[in-house]
Amino acid sequence: MKMDRRNLLAALAAGLAVPMLSACGGSDDDTHEPANTVVDVAAGDPQFSILVEAVQAAGLVETLSGPGPFTVFAPTNDAFAALLGELGTTKEALLADTDLLTAVLTYHVLSAKVVAADVQALPKPATVDTVQGSSFTVNADLSITDGRGRTAMLVATDVMASNGVIHVIDKVILPPA
């Protein structure tokens, strides 16, 4: 489901800043949940092939295939290509650095299922705590500012999985240095 960008940011900014939203995931009345995990959904979409390779290289497949709930901000292959150019490195070198890869990937994950419709009312900007331990900011202009001051835009939201939800972003976000 796609939302207009203004409602999307309002929704994400509102819900991501509220830790109690972890209660939104896995409710008993979620009868329309798909059978595939966030890893399965990403693996089934060619635009996430580098993300899936990274999740595999970092040893996070089992974790992200677990019960969750998770919210994953999933960068596309184009986002990873841009990051490699920014860093002046290759995909192989990035995938080989498992410590860095794990920190970057877990920075894209929240330990709650946060769908856009759940989160429309909070003021912006909102600080979002990630599984990695650092936070990023969701801004009023429909962007995410990472720990290094870089900005990513939300491209699509509410890609449902059995153990959470995926929101597509156009840039790999990075935790503070």
Image (tube, rainbow, N blue to C red):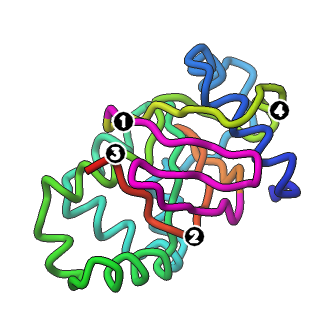
Disc 4 + disc 2, Cβ < 8 Å: no
Determine the CA span between mark 1 and mark 2. 20 Å
Quadrant that contains the N terminus: bottom right
Disc 3 + disc 2, Cβ < 8 Å: no
- Residue behind mark 2: 170
- Residue behind mark 3: 106
Relative image position of residue 55 (x, y in whole percent) = 30, 59
- Residue behind mark 1: 134
Relative image position of residue 123 (x, y in whole percent) = 77, 28
Give the residue drawn at x 57%, y 62%. Answer: 152
Give the residue drawn at x 29%, y 65%. Answer: 54
- Residue behind mark 4: 120
Determine the CA span between mark 3 and mark 1. 10 Å
- The stretch of residues the image draws in magenta is 133-156
- At mark 2, the secondary structure is loop
Query: What amino acid is at disc 3?
Result: Thr
Determine the CA span between mark 4 and mark 2. 22 Å
Give the residue drawn at x 34%, y 48%. Answer: 175
Query: What amino acid is at disc 4?
Result: Gln
Splitting the image into 4 quarters, where does residue 153 fall? bottom right
Query: What amino acid is at disc 1?
Result: Ser
Give the class, few, some or many, for how many residues have Cα within 10 Å of label 3's Cα (few <14, many ≥20).
many
Q: Is residue 56 magenta?
A: no
Relative image position of residue 98 (x, y in whole percent) = 14, 58
User: Tag 1 or tag 3, which sits nearer the N-term?
Assistant: 3
- At mark 3, the secondary structure is helix
Task: Work out whether residue 72 or residue 46 is closer to the camera in this orientation and state it.
Answer: 72
Count of numbered circles in the view: 4
Relative image position of residue 102 (x, y in whole percent) = 23, 51
Disc 1 + disc 2, Cβ < 8 Å: no
Give the class, few, some or many, for how many residues have Cα within 10 Å of label 1's Cα (few <14, many ≥20).
some
